[in-house]
Amino acid sequence: MGINWDSLTFSLTPTDTMFISTSDIDGNWSVGEYLPYGDIKISPAAGVLNYGQGLFEGLKAYRTKEGKITLFRPIENAKRMAAGARRLCMPEFPEEKFLEVMIEIIKRNIDYLPPYKKGSLYLRPCLWGTGARLGVAPAPEYTFIVYASPVGPYFKEGFKPIKLKITTDFHRAAPRGTGNVKAIGNYAGGMLPAKKAKSDGFSEVIYLDAKKDLYIEEVGAANFFCIKGDTLITPPTDSVLPGITRKSVMQIAKDVFGMEVIERAVHIDDALTADEVFATGTAAVISSIGLIEYQEKEYIYNNFTVGPKTEQLYNYITGIQLKEIEDKYGWIVDVDI
């Protein structure tokens, strides 16, 4: 394969095998098949292409120091995809089959799983309306597809602090829309704001609420947190994606570190006067935020170093993922090769 594990980034490296299953609108899924990774045929009138009837998920498999393989909270991904399917009028893919497929995809692409602490094998399950449809209505047929890729850090900085910019030119999601669903249509709109931010020297943008432009919503495609004293604050998931890493960090903060955890609207002033700020997501796990620019003024946190509580949370959750800290929650699924 010739993969340089030390220079791995968050980008696509095609692996050997993918999985495909199809269903009618009533959820009668085929057994499915494992195929060599490659292009697929799709109708130009497919619902996913014309009307954006599609979802995706992202989860990671890790190699531990002892060489064991772990998968982090896959059933949560299955549940979130099912919730998104209901919102977008698509049939749900069964949870038990979801887990079975994830494990088999790891096994069939095991040579692409990076060594211990060199990255992870990222799994990308997708659910698309692939049946032909002219007119805005649910597609008559659906495809569930899973492929994998070895990945490194999502941000080139790794766990070092990143620089973000609060945008007042763009919104990510509207109230009562699909912002809390991992719909494919949520992501194209973020490309231009991210491109502009990166050209100005930032890693990403922070989006504000679409109603008042006063409350923090998300960091690009990641969840936002701020710490004030021993209190951890994060926006509610009304129009924000209910992140699985987000949910895990909140549990750890409360149970392990005795922090008060609050879900509420996070005013800009809360964020700019916080002791520490960070973002969470499957791709980056936890990203420390060292600087936020708002209205051409820079706000720096911890002298642009990782905050102590942020580091504790990062070490604990990655410790669970790598089986170096006891998983008292039952979050880890072991993959036997």
Image (spheres, rainbow, N blue to C red):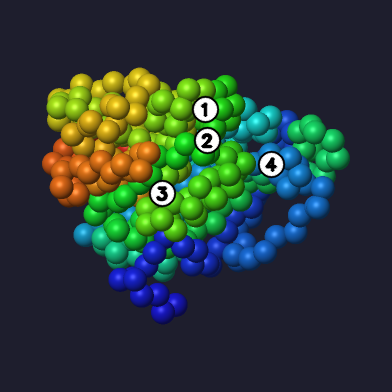
Is label 4 in a helix, a strand or a loop?
A: loop
Disc 1 crowd, CA 10 A, few/some/many (<14, 14-19, 20+): some
Disc 4/disc 1 C-alpha distance (Å): 21 Å
Residue identified by numbered label 4: 52
Q: Is residue 258 left or right of residue 127?
A: left
Residue identified by numbered label 3: 204
Residue 299: give x, y in percent of width and height.
25, 41
Is label 2 in a helix, a strand or a loop?
A: loop
Residue 235: give x, y in percent of width and height.
38, 26
Disc 2/disc 1 C-alpha distance (Å): 6 Å
Which residue shows up at 79% across the image and 38% down it?
140
Q: Quadrant of residue 29?
A: top right
216 over 326 or under it: above or below: above
Disc 2/disc 3 C-alpha distance (Å): 13 Å
* Residue 30 appears in the picture as rendered: no
Disc 3 crowd, CA 10 A, few/some/many (<14, 14-19, 20+): many
67 over 98 or under it: above or below: below
Which residue shows up at 30% across the image and 58% down it?
157
Disc 2/disc 4 C-alpha distance (Å): 19 Å
Q: Please tell me whether mark 4 or mark 1 is closer to you in this view.
A: 1
Q: Amino acid at mark 4?
A: Gly
Give yes or no for contact between labels 2 and 4 (Cβ–Cβ under 8 Å): no
Give yes or no for contact between labels 2 and 1 (Cβ–Cβ under 8 Å): yes
